[in-house]
Image (tube, grey):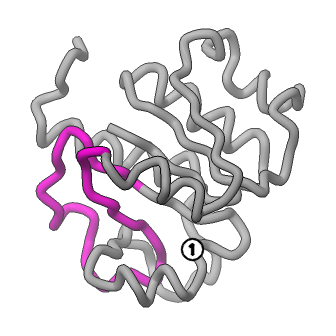
Amino acid sequence: MHVVLLEPEIPQNAGNVSRTCVLTNSELHLIKPLGFSLQDRYLKRAGLDYWQELSLTVHQSWESFLEQQKNQPGRFLFFSTQGKRYYTEVQYQENDFLIFGSETTGLPANLLLYYCHRVYRVPMVEHIKRSLNLGNTVAVVLYEALRQQKFPDLS
């Protein structure tokens, strides 16, 4: 599986996601601009000693990410509070790209519009204006995808 963070802002969240990726044998893609340095102590602390095991690709922009992935297998699936369907409605495949937006702005409106048929949500109560933490959202979605595939290469 591929986890994609588009313009993440908080180092602790990226560190948490990186740890989840290592422990699930998933590749992490970070798309700039980043709200932190990859040398950030909070990022490293949240990822603990897993950094050397992480399969990480940093992309300069969304456009460069698209260019690098155009010949790769796998679908782009987007996760946002703006999604109309639940993340559990997807039949996940091993090379899917699970794409998440930044902590404060989420996914850009142009992506949500262009890929509207591939935008999903994690259900939450409506009256709270804040959403689930990015690291938690990634874990919920990624583990559902892996569960559907019978946890390949995990014990």
Quadrant position of residue 131: bottom right
Position above or below: 28 against 113: above
Q: Nearer the viewer, residue 88 or 59?
A: 59
User: Disc 1 marks which amino acid?
Assistant: Leu
Secondary structure state at the residue bearing disc 1: loop
| Residue displayed at 59% across by 63% down | 62
| Residue displayed at 78% across by 41% down | 11
Give the labeled residue for mark 1.
107
| Residue displayed at 70% across by 51% down | 60
Position above or below: 39 against 154: below
Across the whole image, how many numbered discs are drawn on residues? 1
Q: Does the magenta portion include 101?
A: no
133 to the left or right of 10: left
In the rendered image, the quadrant that contains the N terminus is top left
| Residue 44 on image: x %, y % | 78, 23
| Residue 84 on image: x %, y % | 31, 85
- Find the magenta span and give its range: 72-98
Position above or below: 123 against 102: below
| Residue 91 on image: x %, y % | 12, 56
| Residue displayed at 27% across by 64% down | 87
Rate crowding at label 1 as few (under 14), some (14 to 19) or many (20 or more) other CA atoms within 10 Å. Answer: many
34 to the left or right of 143: right
In the rendered image, the quadrant that contains the C terminus is top left
Q: Does the magenta portion include 82?
A: yes
| Residue 115 on image: x %, y % | 36, 80
